[in-house]
Amino acid sequence: MSQAYRDAGVDINAGYKSVELIKKHIKKTAIPGVLSGIGGFGGLFMPDITGYRQPVLVSGTDGVGTKLKLAFILDKHGTIGCDAVAMCVNDVICCGAKPLFFLDYLAVGKNHPAKIASIVGGVADGCVQAGCALIGGETAEMPGFYPEDEYDLAGFCVGIVDKEKMLSGANVRAGDAIVGIVSSGVHSNGFSLIRKLFKINSSASREILGEYIDSIGCTLGEELIKPTKIYVHAFLPLLDKFEIKAAAHITGGGFIENIPRMLRGGLTASITRGSFPVPHIFSLISEHGNIGENDMYNTFNMGIGFVFAVARKEADAAIAELRRAGEKAYKIGEVVSGKEGIIFK
């Protein structure tokens, strides 16, 4: 290896070791269609388009955001990769698309092979949950750009859907029901605000993150680090059984920004207060920061991570189907005529 490059802070041998360690994780994500292993200049995937009249590829990209700070402080890196996958695949399925493959980008201050393997292991776990393949990625060692023990993580996925089955929101009508599937907690949004409220900025924050809180049944750190829920296997099977018209991933911007994105002009989402349980973590955040209801619903998922519009006559059956599959879901409102985008009643 180049001694000069190593003197500059880039350890190529550590990179080789990282690749060897992550191979076992990548292998478990293999699905039909994967044509290449890691190490090439591109990831290869040949989709089976049998049964598709007009196949459309749907892509999504995202990162984990400042939730990464918790992983650094807690020194827990095994689930943060699942967040990266979830943020992408949950967007893609809003179009009705089945995720096919995922690639990640990991930039580190210093290449610690075991840590890299842990992070990518989380990415692979997320891919397994989403039923897609991890076909490639990039690990960049960037000394002097990132602190030695910090990193950034992002990725993108590609899915497929038949054009005639795409969820565009064009068929949503006033009177349709809005169903919400519960979240696993805060997911990966609002952490800049959370870190400010609880003063989570450095290793000195471990004390507050390690504090057990009766109302949430675990420590604050354990609650906040929970990975974002992946809704692929909960939502996609519904499309063949019910008249699902549109869907929204409740991510950055919370209810107020995301639910209107699945509606066309002249329609409003009317959300019923008290129609679903709000987890205690959100009450804790609201009380700790004296944050009003509007700001809470404009920042966080409030316990509902995925929403869809369905013909009113099928709402109860769709909820029952989700519950049979082990998911908690609620009718949280309905579509009404109006220009507001979203209202609460």
Image: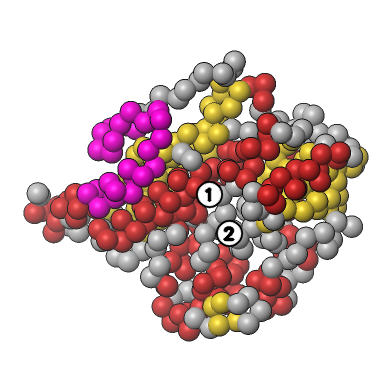
Q: Which residue is mark 1?
A: 86
Counting labels gives: 2
Mark 2 vs mark 1, CA separation in Å: 9 Å
Identify the main secondary structure in magenta: loop
Q: Report the disc number at residue 283.
A: none
Residue 328 in percent (x, y) is at 69, 56
Dividing the picture into quarters, in which one does residue 92 lie?
A: top right
**Disc 2 secondary structure class:** loop
| Residue 176 appears in the figure | no
Residue 303 in percent (x, y) is at 69, 61
The amino acid type of the residue labelled 1 equals Ala
**Residue drawn at point x = 54 percent, y = 28 percent:** 160
Q: Where, quadrant-wise, is the C terminus in this rendering?
A: bottom right
Which callout, 2 or 1, points at the residue further toward the start of the chain? Answer: 1
Using residue 46 as the reference point, say whether residue 317 is left or right of it.
right
Using residue 52 as the reference point, say whether residue 38 is left or right of it.
left
Q: Which residue is mark 2?
A: 187
